[in-house]
Image (tube, rainbow, N blue to C red):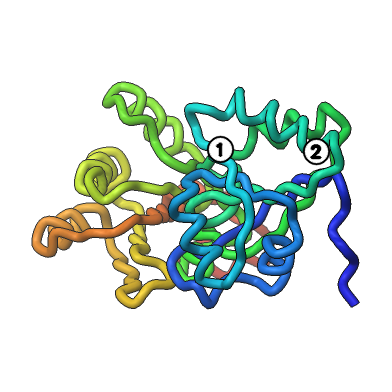
Amino acid sequence: MEAPLQPGTLYLVATPIGNLEDITLRALRVLRECDAVAAEDTRRSGQLLAHFGIRKPLLSYFKFNEARRSEDILDRLRRGEKIALVTDAGSPGISDPGERVVRAAIAAGCRVESVPGPCALVAALTASGLPGEEFHFVGFLPHKSGQRRTTLEALRAQPCTLVLYESPHRIDRLLGELAELMPERDVVLARELTKKFEEFLRGKPAELVAQARRRALRGEFVVLIGAAPDTNRQREPGDLSAGK
């Protein structure tokens, strides 16, 4: 038997990134039993709740009202309410609103629980074919050209798989930047994850530039970049590849 929700707790509920079948049983239970749902987009989250036959008060919580709304949520938690926080897709706080209210809740001594589930980062990385034992998650790059270039130049030094999120109207730009700054890297584009037209495109940046221009790719993208070829690897005793 599942334990009841705890009063005064903030529940961080992961929601589907495209396929509604990916929602977890625990997420549904929390959404049914909580007192209110704080949502990045109340209309979109309202549709999700309605799909599963759930009716709850919705609180708007997004980038431009985080400070004010965080105080409202804290007041509710102090009164013993059980609040679920959701974003449009995926997990709160991962390239989405959530960090501010989590920090505030922790500072106030309120309980915070994660209700894990769908995550574009994990879905893309596990199916990419790139090494996943060590990776660097970037999220979204800055919009301004100078800041983007500085960030990408710094990322070149990372000795692991890089994972970025990118919007459809900037994907051509990103691929062009990678063709210039990391031309030798293996790149994987994951788009429309968990949806009907899910697709993985693999190749060097220049190859993917050509594909993107030819096909006018759409959808939200996860971009995965392989680590730089290790041309200076030190020979180790027993290394059969040494000397070849």
Judge left or right: residue 89 versus residue 80: left
Amino acid at circle 2:
Leu
Look at 35% across and 72% down and name the residue there. Answer: 198
Are the residues tagged 1 and 2 within 8 Å (C-beta)?
A: no
**Dot 2 alpha-carbon crowd within 10 angstroms: few under 14, some 14 to 19, many 20 or more:** many
**In the rendering, at what x and y percent does residue 15 appear?**
56, 61
Depth order, front residue of 85/106: 85
The answer to which of marks 1 and 2 sits earlier in the sequence is: 1
**In the rendering, at what x and y percent does residue 158 appear?**
51, 41
Mark 1 lies on residue: 61
**In the rendering, at what x and y percent does residue 240 appear?**
58, 70
Mark 2 lies on residue: 77
Report helix, strand or loop for mark 1. Answer: loop
Look at 75% across and 62% down and name the residue there. Answer: 33
Q: Is residue 5 visible?
A: yes
Amino acid at circle 1:
Tyr
Look at 45% across and 37% down and name the residue there. Answer: 155
Q: Quadrant of residue 197?
A: bottom left
**In the rendering, at what x and y percent does residue 51 appear?**
50, 71
Judge left or right: residue 161 versus residue 188: right
